[in-house]
């Protein structure tokens, strides 16, 4: 196909091919996931969620707070005496 116009037939052709490939990949994933055990599906779900940026940012903030409390940069009212 000739690339004549920016919004023309060639662009439509590429979008149609992309949609077809996405459909094929979706079918492949469905077949691959069909034989998986519940434990494998759970492991994949947890890996997706725990590998996300919001999860990592939350844990970075929690560890920074924990370090600050342990280094006594931030004091909270629970500890009134110093450890011996």
Image (spheres, helix red, strand yellow):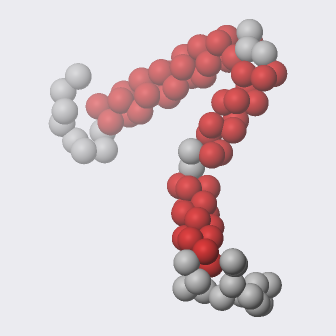
Is 63 on the left-hand or right-hand side of 18? Answer: right
Q: Is residue 56 above or below residue 69?
A: above
Residue 63 sits in quarter: bottom right
x and y percentages locating residue 29 in the rendered image: 62, 18
The quadrant where residue 76 appears: bottom right
Judge whether 67 appears above or below 6 on screen. Answer: below
Q: Position of residue 53 (x, y in %)?
A: 53, 55
- Position of 20 compared to 33: left or right? left
Depth check: 6 or 81 in front? 81
Quadrant location, the N terminus: top left
Q: Looking at the image, which residue is at 67% across and 11% down?
A: 31
Q: How many marks?
A: 0
**Vertical position of residue 54 compared to residue 29: above or below:** below
Residue 27 visible in image: no
Viewer-nearest residue: 84 or 71: 84
Which residue is farthest front? 84
Q: Residue at x 55, y 78 (%)?
A: 71
- Quadrant assignment, res 58: bottom right
Which sits in the foreground, 52 or 16? Answer: 52
Locate residue 12, reporting x and y percent.
38, 34
Query: In the image, 6: left or right of 35?
Result: left
- Which quadrant would the C terminus be assigned to in this image? bottom right
Residue at figure coordinates x 61%, y 74% from the top left: 70
């Amino acid at each position: 196909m000739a690339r004549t116009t920016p919004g023309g037939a060639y662009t439509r052709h590429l979008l149609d091919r992309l949609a077809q490939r996405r459909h094929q990949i979706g079918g492949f994933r469905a077949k691959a996931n069909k034989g998986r055990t519940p434990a494998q599906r759970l492991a994949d779900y947890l890996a997706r969620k725990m590998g996300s940026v919001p999860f990592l940012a939350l844990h970075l903030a929690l560890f920074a707070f924990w370090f600050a409390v342990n280094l006594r940069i931030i004091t909270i009212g629970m500890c009134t005496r110093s450890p011996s």
